[in-house]
Image: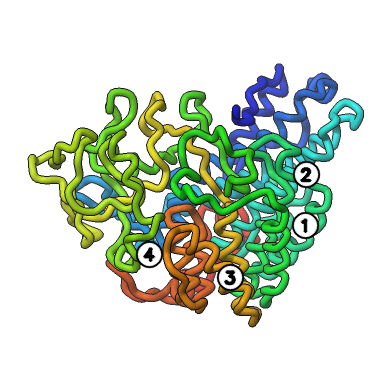
Amino acid sequence: MKKHIFTKTLASGALVLALILGACTDLEVPNLTELPDDSAQLLSDPANAAQFLAAGYAPLRNMLDQGNWYGMVEHVTDEMQGPTRGTDWDDNGIWRTLHTHSWDPFHAFIQNAWNTLSEGQAKCVFSLTTIQQFPDAGVPDKAQYLLELRYLRAFYIFCTVDMFGQVPYREVGEIDFKLPPSKIMSSAEATEWLITELNAIIPQMKDKGEIPYSRATKTAAQTLLAKVYLNSEAWGAGAKYNEAVTACNDVINSGKYALNADYFGIFKPDNSDRTSNADESIFVATFEGNQGLNANIHQPMRTLHYNQTFGPGNTYSPWNGFTTIADFYNKWDQTDKRFKDDSWKAINGFNLGFLEGQQFKADGTPLNDRGGNPLIFTVECPLNGANEAQGVRVVKYAPDNNATDGSRSGNDFVIFRIGDVYLMRAEAAFRAGTGDRGQADLDAVRSIRGVPSVTVSADALLNEYGYELYWEGAHRRQALIRFGKFNEAWTNKSASPEYRKLFSIPQTAIDANPNLKQNPGY
């Protein structure tokens, strides 16, 4: 199944506009008040409308860069750390401040995340404004494009309020980007806006199978709505757990997705069967490693040792970076299918999942580090001053051995999937007092992963989020916050103050928009 990728080039002034759309954020503020001079020509070609839809999807890939949204929401949890090894990965302490919850308003990667999410909302607003000007008769999919852009705008707003607790908001038509957004929504206001907006578009959206793979579906919007309801209390907008159960019911009962017994198959480079009803993926960011549609997302490069090569002729040398921490690693039942998959050893020498102990080449020869010492990954790993071998590595997404660049990958990044929805319904039912429903959903996930039932409880649910969704994005941070564990001490991190549940607003954003106020504590 070929991925649905937008590649058509716009003509003349529209091409200029596409370049502007690629650069606009709240910090770089070109005047987008008007379309190009040849806008009549632009709007006369219905095929151009698809490019404005593509602009709304584009920031998803940038979000997954290690120095952007993905890195921020993972490195502040107990799943991931970026240890310094000599001078490698020091980067002036930028990774350490995330792990230890000591970042400030000048943190470059937090600024990147803010900019990308702001860019995402701006692109959606501009594209919504522009697509509305195309004649209905010329663009049969016009209504669908507008619905998808409304969903994407909601997704970027969801991520912004989750990270920062406030959202600069632009109305459709508010496209003079020399001016700051007209409104700053509080956490509670953003929550209510998301609920209203998603409930408005869901009945009109298309189901899986009615729209090309990787495009936003009705179930993607229902999943996002379930996440809003589930996090509503933590965001200060009141408990909405029964509503979360209902939204999860809608996704699960659609029959479009199923828990996949091949756990690591969910994250493979090839996506040829992603349209089947046996697939877990609900909403993904698409990547084509050999077509330039990519970002710095290739997880094996970030974590594996320099000598654990892969790719054509095993030519790609990883960066020996991120590890998990002892506290998280030691929670595991190592018979869990999600813990390790040895099938990849015959291909590249390392397993998928968690890598600990002596490492090998594909032919079984033991590997050494660059100093000639046995390459033995240890559970314990300091945050500063680690040697080359310390730290358990994690390979969730199998390497793309056909990629033409080691840092590029054909693996589509799974943003929402059905395993998460089962756990969300389990948690929401548990919190709403219907524990039998929660127990059944927890059992369903654990059964297909090959581990025995455990009694549903707050600790059991939090642990299961970790087992099921580790290194997948914002899931762990949100769960730790909901269960009151985010500010506790863990390996290489002391207890942190409550205000660290939110990131600091970048100082550059405050300088550009006087309506923004720094979050308390910063």
Amino acid type assigned to the residue bearing label 1 in the image: Glu
Task: Give coordinates of residue 497: x percent, y percent.
Answer: 42, 76
Quadrant of the rendered structure where residue 430 is? bottom right
Between disc 2 and disc 4, the foreground one is: 2
Q: Secondary structure at mark 1?
A: helix
Drawn side of residue 448 relative to residue 76, left or right: right
Q: Which mark is residue 206?
A: 2
Q: Which residue is mark 3?
A: 440
Task: Give coordinates of residue 47: x percent, y percent.
Answer: 77, 23
Disc 2 versus disc 4: distance between alpha carbons? 37 Å
Do the residues bearing badges 4 and 3 touch, measured as CB atoms within 8 Å? Answer: no
Q: Earlier in the sequence, mark 4 or mark 3?
A: 4
Between disc 2 and disc 1, the foreground one is: 2
The residue sitting at 80% across, 39% down in the picture is 144
Do the residues bearing badges 2 and 1 touch, measured as CB atoms within 8 Å? Answer: no
Disc 1 versus disc 3: distance between alpha carbons? 31 Å
Q: Is residue 229 visible?
A: yes
Disc 2 versus disc 1: distance between alpha carbons? 16 Å
Q: Nearer the viewer, residue 18 or 380?
A: 380
Q: Which mark is residue 78?
A: 4
Q: Which residue is mark 1?
A: 197
Between disc 4 and disc 3, the foreground one is: 3
